[in-house]
Image (cartoon, grey):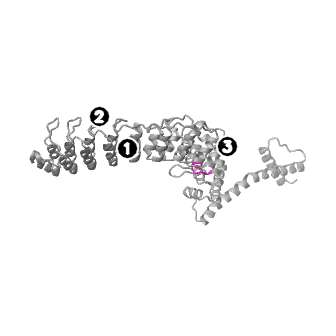
Amino acid sequence: MHGPERRNLLDLFRLIVYIDPSFHPGKNVERSCLEVRMVFRWFFALLALIFLPLTASGQEDASIRPRLEALRIPFSEEAFLEEIRKGNTETVSLFLKGGMSPNVQDPNGRSALVWAAGNGHAAIVKLLLQNKADLCGGGSQSALLWAAANGRREAAAALLGAGARECEQDKTRMTSVVAAAQNGYVETVELFLEETADVTEGEKISALERAAANGHLDVIHLLIHHGVAPDAKTPPEFNPVGSAAFRGHTEIVKFFLDRGADPNGPVPVYGTPLGAAAGGGHLPAAQLLLERGAAPTATALRSAVQGGHLEIARLLLDKGVDVNVVDADKTPLIAAIAGRKTNLLPLLIERGADLNAGVGFVEPPLLLATQSGETEMVRLLLKGGANRDVRGKDGRTALMWAAISGHLEITQALLQGGADVQAKDQMGRTARVYAKERGFTEVARRLTEAEKKPAGEKKK
């Protein structure tokens, strides 16, 4: 072997020893050369395995954007989310291959996975999960909740398979099961009940109440089939009879009553299912509940009056509720005036409502109507026999309050009804003084004219 060749071989030996210290050339140089060649073949093969895929990947990544541009799609987060919304799986795949994060979020914090799930694009959901999308990311509502709330069964199934129920650790809040029931997606509810073992009893009861409130009888049947008792003693906020009654789902009210539900079970705000039906203004549901043993209550009457539901108020009065009963610091008449329900006044006056009684710190009806500027109510109360000079806690009359507020029409109605224009409050002020102090010129003029009239002419 010649000198230059030998020097080259020695350099190769040094490189091999640097790579593999265990290598020792033998006396047979030709054999050692063969070993060197074999080592280098393995070395370069290893380099090829490492770098060729990276090169190919780089070439592929470099080709993504031109392909998207050819489709007139910019490589941006906004465009990525738009393609997800449209359900374009191939385009979404190009974005991901081009390096787009699977956890992109819109300005409201909703992630790519949330948009795919909510729109029911199961293939894109799976694609995003394959690319390590965050199961529980995307704002206060998870992708699973979005899928369930929109009835996207296949997308929900894909998320369940990936363990998305772990994102709903607080089962006392709105969960995917409850959301599906609320919106009437019976097949999606069935998926949760049959494919997962961690649906709690609390979730089932909440789902039952939401289904009842929204009139989804098929979901109710499914939940009962899976062990929810139709006559279960639920917390007041989850009373399905009350929820159905408030929304006027009479068929569902009947369904529960037929299966032993309590017609007088507690309901928030409205007291009982009857109160809920009254507050919602649903006469058929109210009639059914009364037929099935619901007690006609003061709260039910107040709820009907506050809602302006004349026929239900009439029904409850016919069933014996006292027209002057006090509930929540209001008589029915005061509740009607406070709620500006003028249509209820003739009925209440006809049935004997006390037109002059206040309750606690609440002023008498005529004062309330005047302070609210309700001219027609004032006329109805005066016509019904209300005391035109009744005084409130501060000694002021309705005429004084009309002057203080500048209500010209009410001032005229009270004067025509014979209100005492000379009456003074605890500070010695008359209605005219109040009107003048506050700059209500026309009201002050009318009151001045009334003061000048002889006593016998003031009621004309």
Can the viewer see residue 7?
Answer: no
Q: CA distance from mark 3 to mark 2?
A: 57 Å
Residue type pointed to by label 2: Phe
Residue type pointed to by label 3: Glu
Q: Is residue 382 magenta?
A: no
Q: Residue at x 61, y 62 (%)?
A: 68
Q: Residues within 10 Å of mark 1 (few under 14, many from 20)?
A: many
In the structure shown, which secondary structural element does the residue marked by tag 2 occupy? loop
Q: In the displayed structure, does residue 421 sit left or right of residue 4? A: left
Give percent across and percent down for residue 312. Answer: 41, 45
Residue 194 numbered mark, or none: 3
Residue 361 numbered mark, or none: 2
Q: Is residue 149 magenta?
A: yes
Give percent across and percent down for residue 352. Answer: 31, 40
**Residue beneath disc 1:** 306
Q: In the displayed structure, does residue 130 sit left or right of residue 353? A: right
Q: Residues within 10 Å of mark 2 (few under 14, many from 20)?
A: few
